[in-house]
Image (cartoon, helix red, strand yellow):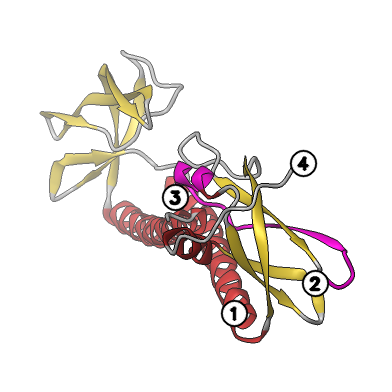
Amino acid sequence: MKKAEGVTIIGGVLFFLMGVLGIVMGVLTGISENKFQESALTTTAIITDIDVRYYRSNGKNKKDRDVFVEYEVEGQKYKNELNIYKSSMREGQRIEVFYDPENPGDSRIASGGVSIIIVIMGIIFLTFGTGFIVLYMKNKIKRKNLLSNGICVTGTIIDVVPDRSVRINQQHPYKAEVEFIDSITGERYLYSSDSVMNKSIHSMIGATVNVYVDPQDKSSYYVDLKSATANINNGMPRVYSSK
């Protein structure tokens, strides 16, 4: 059964890798721009055209712009596409460009901290990714400890509800609500399973399931949904609770 935490760790790794890539790209971009400007000369160029390009990203329509300029170096005219677009740019506008004296056709404008923005975005992605990975590892260690050292009780899945604290691909995962009644004290305990993405979890309502509880802290527990699947496959009778 596909667990939401499995999707979480995949997302965490992707965020982490995107963060690392963003930081590396930002640093390399900054180094490249600084190196270019150290040896570059400046001249005045005219914006001849601003082309608008439309594309789809994450299901949304977006647009980007390509800026073309024309300038003259030592009596020879050059046309080039600039490296970035700024909202203040207009066709016919005169702007200062940097060009490579050994290759005048290579012209750019000051990036205005674009490399810094890329690095900052990379750090944000890296932070989110690291957080997801750390959370996954903590839950994994906790689950392993409970399976090894926890007290195993047998409860009954009395309901399956959406986990509204999580949304993956515009969909809430599900979690099983488990009831355990202590045969000695008659005390009733309620537990919630980890979130899963598979709707088939609804077929487990009424099935018995193992719950591993920390003997020192009863609020710390793990609902082993695999045991419910095993119990169903073994033909164990379902128990339906009247809520």
According to the picture, the residue beneath numbered tag 3 turns out to be 118
**What residue is at 87 percent from the left and 64 percent from the top?**
186
**Residue situated in front as seen by the camera: 83 or 201:** 201
Q: Which residues are magenta?
A: 184-203
* Kind of residue indicated by mark 3: Ile
Q: Which mark is residue 243?
A: 4
Badge 1: residue crowd in 10 Å (few <14, some 14–19, many ≥20): some
SS state under label 2: strand
* Kind of residue indicated by mark 2: Lys
Q: Marks 1 and 3: CB-CB under 8 Å?
A: no
**What residue is at 46 percent from the left and 55 percent from the top?**
122
Badge 4: residue crowd in 10 Å (few <14, some 14–19, many ≥20): few
**What residue is at 23 percent from the left and 24 percent from the top?**
68
According to the picture, the residue beneath numbered tag 2 turns out to be 218
Q: Which comes sooner in the sequence, label 2 or label 4?
A: 2
**Residue 74 in the figure: left or right of residue 158:** left
Q: Which comes sooner in the sequence, label 1 or label 2?
A: 1
* Kind of residue indicated by mark 1: Leu
- Say which of marks 4 and 3 sits in front: 4
Q: Position of residue 233 (x, y in %)?
A: 42, 60
According to the picture, the residue beneath numbered tag 1 turns out to be 147
